[in-house]
Amino acid sequence: MPGILVVAETSEGAVAPISFELLGAARQLSAQGGGSVSAVVAGGEAEAKALIAHGADSVYTADAALAGQSADASLAAVEAALQGSGADIVLIGTTSFGRDLGPALAFRQKTGIAMDCTELKFDGGRLRATRGCYGGNARAEHTWKAPLQIATVKPKSFDAPEADAGRSGSVSATGAAGESKVKVLGVSKAESAGIRLEDAQVVVSGGRGLGDENGFRALEELASVLPQAAVGASRAACDLGWYPPAAQVGLTGKVVSPNLYIAVAISGASQHMAGMAGSKNIVAINKDPDANMVKAAKFAIVDDYKKVVPALIEEIKKLG
């Protein structure tokens, strides 16, 4: 039976979180009839055990040294795992590595690739992938004519399965050695003030309804009194220059799935809603009772944020 191959990545000597999220997506597809789940990783026994614990039925290991090289060096190992597993679906993370590897793999395998996907489903025996298009104002569904289907998946689009140390699976070495035409001279990590938006357990986001960039100062103060919180913004607010584009939530920005999403003065455009749809709890603060975000929220406060946010900050401070 055909199956699903996850191209896993490592970061700082361990399996990267995006790889576990891809396994979550793969397990969902498998439950819909997508077949067994395999993974390929540049690493050894420790990485293989972690991948099996999170849902892989089999793991193909490649030389750990490939993890520090450019994506083209990993092509041979991925193709060897593809041949060994017999998979007809390949899932890759939308990362700097995945953006390089995915198109190159699709070209060599003479198939197409859907990039930056946020939804995947198994439909009629074939993969159907959804991604944003036209600047996030529409959503496109992709299917493939070729037997092999390749998709890159945006981080936080799927939940990672809980680790199960009791799971068993097969591990085999690919033995394939690739040669890179690109030499990596060094890696610099971007400095971040505070918690990353994608990793935050609480996200406080603001939209055009804030009125100006000063509204984000109030949201930053609110985030500062909440644990593991970060500030996000709608595309409209970023386009107006009120907040950095790196904080944009939506199909054309970051996909987030926090425990709590506080949407302040955000109407709820479809591309923004798709970027935070995985939030466990949504609270909307908006003057418009008919706003899409208010309708989608678990709790809504219909009032001017300039009155609500300061009062909310004071109440949270009282809780200590």
Image: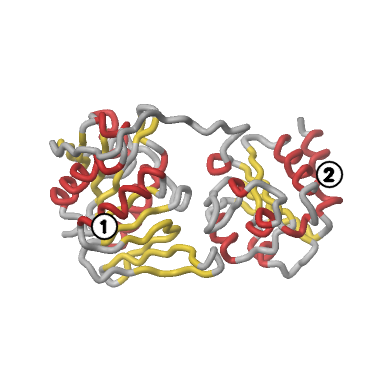
In the image: residue 115, left or right of residue 144: right
Crowd class of label 1 (few under 14; some 14 to 19; many from 20; radius 10 Å): some
Indicate the position of residue 33 as horizontal and vertical percent values. Answer: 26, 62
Corner quadrant of residue 148: bottom left
- Residue 277: give its label: none
Q: Colour mode?
A: secondary structure
Which one is nearer the viewer's eye here, 285 or 299? 285
Indicate the quadrant where residue 111 lies.
Answer: bottom left
**Residue 204 locus on image (x, y percent):** 67, 46
Q: Amino acid at mark 1?
A: Ala
Indicate the position of residue 24 as horizontal and vertical percent values: 37, 49
Q: Evaluate if marks 1 and 2 touch, with contact meaning CB atoms under 8 Å apart.
A: no
In the image, what residue occupies the spot 31% across and 38% down? 70
Q: Is residue 8 above or below residue 3?
A: above
Q: Secondary structure at mark 1?
A: helix
Residue 30 percent coordinates (x, y): 29, 57
- The quadrant of the image that shows the N terminus is bottom left
Determine the image quadrant of residue 174. top left
Residue closer to the observer: 66 or 310: 66
Taking 43 as reference, is 31 above or below it?
Answer: below
- Give the residue number, with chain letter if any, for mark 1: 106
Mark earlier in primary sequence (1, 2): 1
Of badges 1 and 2, nearer the viewer stands: 1
Q: Which mark is residue 310?
A: 2
Q: Residue at x 77, y 38 (%)?
A: 316
